[in-house]
Image (cartoon, helix red, strand yellow):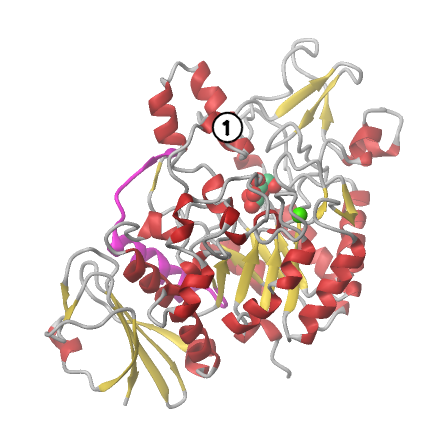
Amino acid sequence: MKKPFWTDAVVYQIYPRSFCDSNGDGIGDIPGIISKLDYLKDLGVDILWLSPIYESPQFDIGYDISDYYKINPEYGTMEDFDRLLEEAKKRGIRIVMDLVANHTSDQHPWFKASKDKNSPYHDYYVWMDGKDGGKRPPNNWTSNFTGPAWTYVPEVGQWYLHIFSAEQPDLNWKNPKVLEEVENIIRFYLDKGVYGFRCDVINQIWKDSYEDSKRITPMARGNEFYLMKEGNHRMLRKIYDDVLSHYDDFVMIGETYNVDLENGKRFQENKELTMFFQFELANVRAFALPVFERPFSAKRFKEVAFKWQKAIEWPTNYLENHDQRRSINKFGDPKRYWKESGKALALFNLTLRGTPFVYQGEEIGMLDLPPRDPATSMDCSARMTNQLMTKMGFVKGLRKKMINLFDRDHARSPMQWNDGISAGFSSNENTWICANPNKNCINVALEEKDPDSILSFYRTLLAYRRKSPALQEGSFLEIETKGDLIAYRRKLGDEEILILLNLTKKKLRLPPFLRSIEGKLALSTREPGDDPTVLLPYEGRLIELA
Ligand code: GLC
Ligand code: CA
């Protein structure tokens, strides 16, 4: 059997609004992406996942779609998109789109039509009568972005469900028409030459019932009624049977928040999803609520990553995306060991088993923005949390500090191409989010010239990976070590690779059984010290075993 294209592919995520602006309006666009395809080819990636580029009022930057069959005019036209597909194909790069199927925009014609109770579209969404003669929401669920998960519309006399913002009404998956619409969208883009989808919040689409939740939590209260329900598994399998099974080459990547091993395995074994994102590693520092964080522990990081490596048939690996802070800020050291920790994280992400994902800017070590006032954030969830915390009486300094821990603008600042105006992202000084002031030290142009840069390390590592069947498809063999030291092997046939990694600011001494191993040091994140039995801070070694 022909092996699927994604088994040895590396995915690069583009956040189109922030990648490259071709016409100087301060907003990234599709011609901008086309102009950087050679850069991406040289970097060594195979698949581009584009965050949503469909027509959208952009309340949640494209995760609120008003027409699935049109391109957001700020980004270009359908012709531009076709050209992107063509140009990518010429370079052997595949395009994967973002499928937002849990909700639409409140500006989608379906939603507008749904306000008429007699319209067939009424049942496309979850409209319900309120409690107490209609005055109170149908239940006590809260949205993922704070506040009630229901909004009342006087002209309808009913409430509609939105597990995100009120601008993102949930589709009613119990209506077979909704499934049919989504299947049509999938077909449309696969027929165009897209190679699949990253499926937004895809493990929450099926709402089992609309009972009150007994849990006390300010965010996503009620999700016990809609996280990974039987109906959810059924819908995904149906999409496979009806549509995907008729295509040769595709990948369905699930964004599956809170997924556990059991459901994860099921998604894959039953062909509901090709692969899925777990969030345990990304949230390894989370502490009860997103506004709290605990110190980074390399030991905990290792344990979580290894757990998924060992259990899942085909894992995904990622450290960043458009919803997360930059990985060097979260898991590394942005000050003293910026370069070393950037490379060490790359070594980890790109040598684990499964499909690796690199988020735009990660390959040059981009960092979070300086602390900012959440009231001015472009991220709707940061703004909404700020409103809630203001209402609850939190003082400004504290709000700023806490919300900065998850403000999604951090990952969404413009890609830093050079040290010019707006980091070379745009000819316009006023971009939709300002470029990070560190653009003079962190940018593509500078790092391209420097063989010791994070970017050069990515290129070398990706080229190495391409030639290494063990890294692409080999087994993952944990090496049990105490404490913070991270050690594992990748093996396929005769090829065997050992990874030794220190993700801390301290030196780590190798245990005796690892000191005597014979092999060739093929790659490292930094010049080793005088004593080879000691890993320096953020030192990582890729060793070819004899
Ligand atoms: C996903 C997206 C996020 C969006 C949310 C609602 O988590 O990654 O950006 O806000 O879904 O669509
Ligand atoms: Ca533009």
Q: Is 46 situated left or right of 310 in this image?
A: right
Magenta stretch: residue 290 in it? yes
Could you tell me residue 533's position as x and y percent? Answer: 13, 74
Quadrant, the C terminus: bottom left
- Position of residue 450 relative to residue 224, above or below, is below
Residue depicted at x 50% and y 55%: 277
Q: Is 305 situated left or right of 93 in this image?
A: left
The magenta segment is: 289-315
Magenta stretch: residue 423 in it? no
Could you tell me residue 205's position as x and y percent? Answer: 64, 43
Q: Label 1's element?
A: helix
Check mark 1 vs ligand 1: CB closer than 8 Å? yes or no: no
Disc 1 residue type? Thr
- Can you see residue 214? no
Circle 1 sits on which residue?
A: 376
Q: Quadrant of residue 527?
A: bottom left
The quadrant of the picture showing ligand 1 is: top right
Q: Quadrant of residue 275?
A: bottom right
Q: Is 314 situated left or right of 206 in this image?
A: left
Residue depicted at x 80% and y 15%: 155
In the foreground, 396 or 304: 396
- Can you see residue 536? yes
Q: Is 312 situated left or right of 205 in this image?
A: left
In the foreground, 117 or 73: 73
Quadrant, the N terminus: bottom right
Residue depicted at x 80% and y 64%: 191
- Position of residue 534 relative to residue 253, above or below, is below
Q: Within 10 angstroms of label 1, few (less than 14), some, or many (20 or more) residues?
A: few
